[in-house]
Image (cartoon, rainbow, N blue to C red):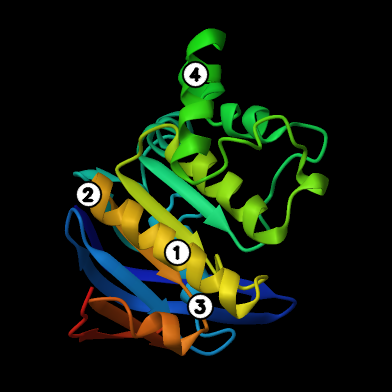
Amino acid sequence: MYQLTGVTKRYTRGKETVEALRGVDLTIADGDQLVIQGPTGGGKSTLLQMIGGLDRPSEGSVELDGVDLATVSEARLTRVRAEKIGIIFQAFNLIPTLTAQENVETALVPLGVKPAERRERAAEALRSVGLGERLTHVPSELSGGQQQRVAIARALVKRPKVLLADEPTGNLDESTRDDIMALLEGLWREHGLTFVMVTHDSSIARRAPRLATIRSGRITLTEQRVAY
């Protein structure tokens, strides 16, 4: 479970101090699906970075299963991210010279998984996202939707507890967007993941049971009725 308390994040831009988050309190239970939405510059991606341990707040605490990501050592934080948190980005962030299977394997290297097991788990993860026939293809040989599926497989191959997605459909057309969302929602239910996603797309936001709207660094939570 996540427990965020009084999370504030300040950035310095020249002589100006900007508060991206202002005293955010948020609880995310195990297995929750939460979508974060808001205007550009409102703080939604900053909040996701706090939840993912990619940045630390200026004030407040970000606890995941009792471990405060705001104060834990860098070595422990890296370990928590490697073991518990899978992250998907809008830009895919695949290594262009590696095959789909090799890209997925990179997530297992920090965990010390042996090469033979890495290959087996990467292949299985790619099969689970419908890319069992694309193991040896490099990113330039894949469509945008297929590249995002590789990125999803890379996030899931380490069997995380938490799946975070920052605008995962932002670079995709409408049809591919719907396919990727159906895949993500299916994986969320199948694996019992805690799933947190940032999106600017209101049609996607309406699909989530919980919606966090951020404006000027402050958060409003809404419970939504969703039919699956």
Q: Residue at x 53, y 54 (%)?
A: 88
Q: Can the viewer see residue 122?
A: yes
Q: Which mark is residue 120?
A: 4
Disc number for residue 192: 2
Q: Quadrant of residue 71?
A: top left
Residue at horizontal 70 percent and vertical 44 percent from the top: 94
Q: Amino acid at mark 3?
A: Ala
Tell me if label 2 and label 4 are in contact, CB under 8 Å. no
Whether residues under marks 4 and 3 lie with C-beta atoms below 8 angstroms apart, the answer is no
Dot label at residue 48: 1
Q: Residue at x 65, y 71 (%)?
A: 172
Q: Secondary structure at mark 3?
A: strand
Task: For marks 4 and 3, give the CA distance.
Answer: 42 Å
Residue 20's label in the rendered image is 3
Element under disc 2: loop
Q: Position of residue 144 (x, y in %)?
A: 70, 60
Camera-nearest residue between 124 and 193: 124
- Which label lies toward us, 4 or 3? 4
- Callout 4: helix, strand or loop? helix
Q: Residues within 10 Å of mark 4 (few under 14, many from 20)?
A: few
Separation of disc 2 and disc 1 at Cα? 19 Å
Task: Give whichever of discs 1 and 4 has the lower sequence position.
Answer: 1
Work out whether 193 lies above or below 84: below
The relative height of residue 148 versus residue 48 in the rendered view (above or below) is: above
Q: Is residue 228 left or right of residue 145?
A: left
- What percent of the width, then of the height, locates residue 119? 55, 18
Query: Quick check: 105 above or below 172?
Result: above
